[in-house]
Image: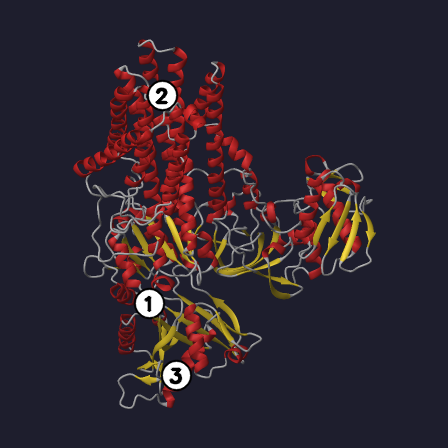
């Protein structure tokens, strides 16, 4: 290894080095054994080596003995022994060097194995890739902007640089999670209580307290670990192959096997897999929101050299990993892979940081802090009153600390995360995949949903239904002319129809592929596929047509351009084919093709075409205009065209669309269609699905948005049911205008053009089965089945998760408040303590863990989609909630205290305390049923859908309580007396009185929950 310097950059050159790895056996082609003493007694090196070999050579397995230094490599066919030996040498050199660097023969540090560096050996190019000339950059990388890398060079670079993958953040270990459970304020208070018990001779009490702490921590560790595993899997998706040029041939490869110097082919829908410098850019636009946060696509240029210090968002000659191509096409030279990409650097800065808390977790954290303060004041009051009444200092201090512990619901933010994770798992079972944890709670607050027409309201399958050409409307389903006497298509009109279909095929990027079984498959958008199917049905040879008239240049649709065109070479002349928005194409036409030939286009012809367009759009068809020009004039000037006709493409509605829209209205959600289709088509679809809630469908055409100020658009956006002829830029503006009212906006989509709006919406919902990679990548939720009912189901489950967090919070705070009422009331009355510190701990263990977790699994209530969404800006508990919680705590605690007084007078303090302890425990467990539903009344919660987890939790808690009472050892530890039939009756009476009392008061004081008015309801199996 030697180093040279040039232009201020250190450049590393790889040379042969003395290898410490020795080849032991190569007798079999499927096995190779090496030995390297550096792996002896170093199992960590063995694991690193095994992983690196597995990544670089898929199909090989590695066994490393840290006892003997043996390295056994097995596979169907093991590569060359020297090659593998050198690879092992480099891995171990890098792993053993200080700070991850190896040492060269001259003692210089070597870049770590797998860190991308240039083929000339440099760790980075002499200047930033965007600041180099393309020729200089190619020279440094050693690539080829025409042929790309050859196969051997690519394979060698992958071995040398490592796979093009990002290192995954390390998850917290179980030990770290467990340690985190021991750092909360309640645990600190428990620790103080245990220390007091220990130093005052209460060894058994101290042991039990510590046991409770460890048990709570263990339960918290298990549930939090499960929640983290669920969250960690949210962003996982299967990477799609990318198209590259290697050895002069176009091929598809796994993006993990890209290397610096590869040539990437970019087209709409491509997810950029590495950082690359543009070689060619044809109207190329890229959505870089993953890096810059800006939802609007940016335009790219290939032939520019930029300043070295230019900001990332302005590097127009580069494309970056994690971004998405939204328009145009291009070719790019890969300059950085893996962790050396821009997004890789960001990830390395984040390291193993945990995701930020969701809004609900933050709210619950604040609630927990407030409860700590309140209960600290109450515990201080109990301590002060006890001292004034002459109670022993140690005894009253232990009671005050135990009360503080029992009255604070531990881990409220963790309860929220666990409940949201439960919701995510429930959605996953229904093929609804959530990519972010806070998306679950956002779903419950959705007030407006923007619906893309194609692929969302309508299916992904299309067919050519009608053609208007040569003055006739042709029904393509039966091949007849509408309204004619015999309905047959004359030969002269057949010629016009054939020319129209051939022209549409020339300006199409769809291709026809045939697999080994002879099954034909059309690759392209649903619209293009419908036209190809019609052309094939009319005997048009698509491959032969494009071979006879090859496309020289293709101009795609773009913002402000609602058409596409292809310049084709036909023998010795150029043919221009144009297809797109009927009005736009017609405006560029000067002639019309009729059954008898071509003539100038008259006003009457234009009116007839526009009328036909309106009629076809009114039948919910997607309508495109087709025109051409054969030679003459500037070949790229899309003017003086010959009008050929209109094609009307049928896009049938998805099943059950109308009931789904009705269910959204019933849930208080406004539905808005945002589509690129023309107004008449959008109006027909909206009317058919019942999109409007107030009678007639209101349509706003996006052409009126030009020059409109954002504040005016925000005012306008509140009333239309349909936004038609919308471009991706305008769709983004509409979403932001809807949000400006303070509404929580969801947006659905499946196409490349939907990406910016999906990203900008509060929650983006992508159709996963037929949707594009771009839509799936930026969306928060992916519907794997493309079933529109999944949107309503996701909202239902999202609302249920939010409701469940409120139920858990209500249960924990009210039951803990009841314990405060018992202890504070006894202290204020100057009577003996009803509950010992040990009994308070037992109560805390029984009622604060398992019932609360089980409430987080409550199935959705029946009315969850018959009430409006919750206000996302409001606190999770409002004033009325706190009034209810305080009332419930007072009732449960007051009845338990009364039971203690009554039974204490008859049977003594210990017997009264025993009955109060069991009565309070039973009352709290029964209170879980009251918290199951938001409705009020004597039977609220008892008629809810089954929740087996809650039944199991309550049964388990009752079993533990019964065991504690029956076993002499635990009875002595808790200070309980034998219960007997009368004692059991007393405990049951306390539980029944508290439960019935709360139900009666709820019927009197609580108002029924609000319900939305709508035309539909929704139900599903739970």
- Residue sitting nearer the eye, 181 or 287: 181
Of the image marks 3 and 2, the number of the one nearer the N terminus: 2
Q: CA distance from mark 1 to mark 2?
A: 61 Å
Quarter of the image for residue 42 reads top right
Of the image marks 1 and 2, the number of the one nearer the N terminus: 2
Crowding at mark 1 (Cα within 10 Å: few <14, some 14-19, many 20+) = many
619 horizontally vs 335: left or right: left
Of the image marks 1 and 3, the number of the one nearer the N terminus: 3
Q: Secondary structure at mark 2?
A: helix
What residue sits right under mark 1 in the picture? 653
Instruction: Establish if 666 lies above or below 546.
Output: above
Mark yes or no: residue 324 visible: yes
Quarter of the image for residue 244 reads bottom right
Residue 208 placed where, x, y %? 47, 25
Q: CA distance from mark 3 to mark 2?
A: 87 Å
Q: CA distance from mark 1 to mark 3?
A: 31 Å
What residue sits right under mark 2 in the picture? 376
- Residue sitting nearer the eye, 411 or 748: 411
Residue 789 placed where, x, y %? 34, 59
Residue drawn at point x = 37 percent, y = 59 percent:
727
Q: Nearer the viewer, mark 1 or mark 2?
A: 2
């Amino acid at each position: 290894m030697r180093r040279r310097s040039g232009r201020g950059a250190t450049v590393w050159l790889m040379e042969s080095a003395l290898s410490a790895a020795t080849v032991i056996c190569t007798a079999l082609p499927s096995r190779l054994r090496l030995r390297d003493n550096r792996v002896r007694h170093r199992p960590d090196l063995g694991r690193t080596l095994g992983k690196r070999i597995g990544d670089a050579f898929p199909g090989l397995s590695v066994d490393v003995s840290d006892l003997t230094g043996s390295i056994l490599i097995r596979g169907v066919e093991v590569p060359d022994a020297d090659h593998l030996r050198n690879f092992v040498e480099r891995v171990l050199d890098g792993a053993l060097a200080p700070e991850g660097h190896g040492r060269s023969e001259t003692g210089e540090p070597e870049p770590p194995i797998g860190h991308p560096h240039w083929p000339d050996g440099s760790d980075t190019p002499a200047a930033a890739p965007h600041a180099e000339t393309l020729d200089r950059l190619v020279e440094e990388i050693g690539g080829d902007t025409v042929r790309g890398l050859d196969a051997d060079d690519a394979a060698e670079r992958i071995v040398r640089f490592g796979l093009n993958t990002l290192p995954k953040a390390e998850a917290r270990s179980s030990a770290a999670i467990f340690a985190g459970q021991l750092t909360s304020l309640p645990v600190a208070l428990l620790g103080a209580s245990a220390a007091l018990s220990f130093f005052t001779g209460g060894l058994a009490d101290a042991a039990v307290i510590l046991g409770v702490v460890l048990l709570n921590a263990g339960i918290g560790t298990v549930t939090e670990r499960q929640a983290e595993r669920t969250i960690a899997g949210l962003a996982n998706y299967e990477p799609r192959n990318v198209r590259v040029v290697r050895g002069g041939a176009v091929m598809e490869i796994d993006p993990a096997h890209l290397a610096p110097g590869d040539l990437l082919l970019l087209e709409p829908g491509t997810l950029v897999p590495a950082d690359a410098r543009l070689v060619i850019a044809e109207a190329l636009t890229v959505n870089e929101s993953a890096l810059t946060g800006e939802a609007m696509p940016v335009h790219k240029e290939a032939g520019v050299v930029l300043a070295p210090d230019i900001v990332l968002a302005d590097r127009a000659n580069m494309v970056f990993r994690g971004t998405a191509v939204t328009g145009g096409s291009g070719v790019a030279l890969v300059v950085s892979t893996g962790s050396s990409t821009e997004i890789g650097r960001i990830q390395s800065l984040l390291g193993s940081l945990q995701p930020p808390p969701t809004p609900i977790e933050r709210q619950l954290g604040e609630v927990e802090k407030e409860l700590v303060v309140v209960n600290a004041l109450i515990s201080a009051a109990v301590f002060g009153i006890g001292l004034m009444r002459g109670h022993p200092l140690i005894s009253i201090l232990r009671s005050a600390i135990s009360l503080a512990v029992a009255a604070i619901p531990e881990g409220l933010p963790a309860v929220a995360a666990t409940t949201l994770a439960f919701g995510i798992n429930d959605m996953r079972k229904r093929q609804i995949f959530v990519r972010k944890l806070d998306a679950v709670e956002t779903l419950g607050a959705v007030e407006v949903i923007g619906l893309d027409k194609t692929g969302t309201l309508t299916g992904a399958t299309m067919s050519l239904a009608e053609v208007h050409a040569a003055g006739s409307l042709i029904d393509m389903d039966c091949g007849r002319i509408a309204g004619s006497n015999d309905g047959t298509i004359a030969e002269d009109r057949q010629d016009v129809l054939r020319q129209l279909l051939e022209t549409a095929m020339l300006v199409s990027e769809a291709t026809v592929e045939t697999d080994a079984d002879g099954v034909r498959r059309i690759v392209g958008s649903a619209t293009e596929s419908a036209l190809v199917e019609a052309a094939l049905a009319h005997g048009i040879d698509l491959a032969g047509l494009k071979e006879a008239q090859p496309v020289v240049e293709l101009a795609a649709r773009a913002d402000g351009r609602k058409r596409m065109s292809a310049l084709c070479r036909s023998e010795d002349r150029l043919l221009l084919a144009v297809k797109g928005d009927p009005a736009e194409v017609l405006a560029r036409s000067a002639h019309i093709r009729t059954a008898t030939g071509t003539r100038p286009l008259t006003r009457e012809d234009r009116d007839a075409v526009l009328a036909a367009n309106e009629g076809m759009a009114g039948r919910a068809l997607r309508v495109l205009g087709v025109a051409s020009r054969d030679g003459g004039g500037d070949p790229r000037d899309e003017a003086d065209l010959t009008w050929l006709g209109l094609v009307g493409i049928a896009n049938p509605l998805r099943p059950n669309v109308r009931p789904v829209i009705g269910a959204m209205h019933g849930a208080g959600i406004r539905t808005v269609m945002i589509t690129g289709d023309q107004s008449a088509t959008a109006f027909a679809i909206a009317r058919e699905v019942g999109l409007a809630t107030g009678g007639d469908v209101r349509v706003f055409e996006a052409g009126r948005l030009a020059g409109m100020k954002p504040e005016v658009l925000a005012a306008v956006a509140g009333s239309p049911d349909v936004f038609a002829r919308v471009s991706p830029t305008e769709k983004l503006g509409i979403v932001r205008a809807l949000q400006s009212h303070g509404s929580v906006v969801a947006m659905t989509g499946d196409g490349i053009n939907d990406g910016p709006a999906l990203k900008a919406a509060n929650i983006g919902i992508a159709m996963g089965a037929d949707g594009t990679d771009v839509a799936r990548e930026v969306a928060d939720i992916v519907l794997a089945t493309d079933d529109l009912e999944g949107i309503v189901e996701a909202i239902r489950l999202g609302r249920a998760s939010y409701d469940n967090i409120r139920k858990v919070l209500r249960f924990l705070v009210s039951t803990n408040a009841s314990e405060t009422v018992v202890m504070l009331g006894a202290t204020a009355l100057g009577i003996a303590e009803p509950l010992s510190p040990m009994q308070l701990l037992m109560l805390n263990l029984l009622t604060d863990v398992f019932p609360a977790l089980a409430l987080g699994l409550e199935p959705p209530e029946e009315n969850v989609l018959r009430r409006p969404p919750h206000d996302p800006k409001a606190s999770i508990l409002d004033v009325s909630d706190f009034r209810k919680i305080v009332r419930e705590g007072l009732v449960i605690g007051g009845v338990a205290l009364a039971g203690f007084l009554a039974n204490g007078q008859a049977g003594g303090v210990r017997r009264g305390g025993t009955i109060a302890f069991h009565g309070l425990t039973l009352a709290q467990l029964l209170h879980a049923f009251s918290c199951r539903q938001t409705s009020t009344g004597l039977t609220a919660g008892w008629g809810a859908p089954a929740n087996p987890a809650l039944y199991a939790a309550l049964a388990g808690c009752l079993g533990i309580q019964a065991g504690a009472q029956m076993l002499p050892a635990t009875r002595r530890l808790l200070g309980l007396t034998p219960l007997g039939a009368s004692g059991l009756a007393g405990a049951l009476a306390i539980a029944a009185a508290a439960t019935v009392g709360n139900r009666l008061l709820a019927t009197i004081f609580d108002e029924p929950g609000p319900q939305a008015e709508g035309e539909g309801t929704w139900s599903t199996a739970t």
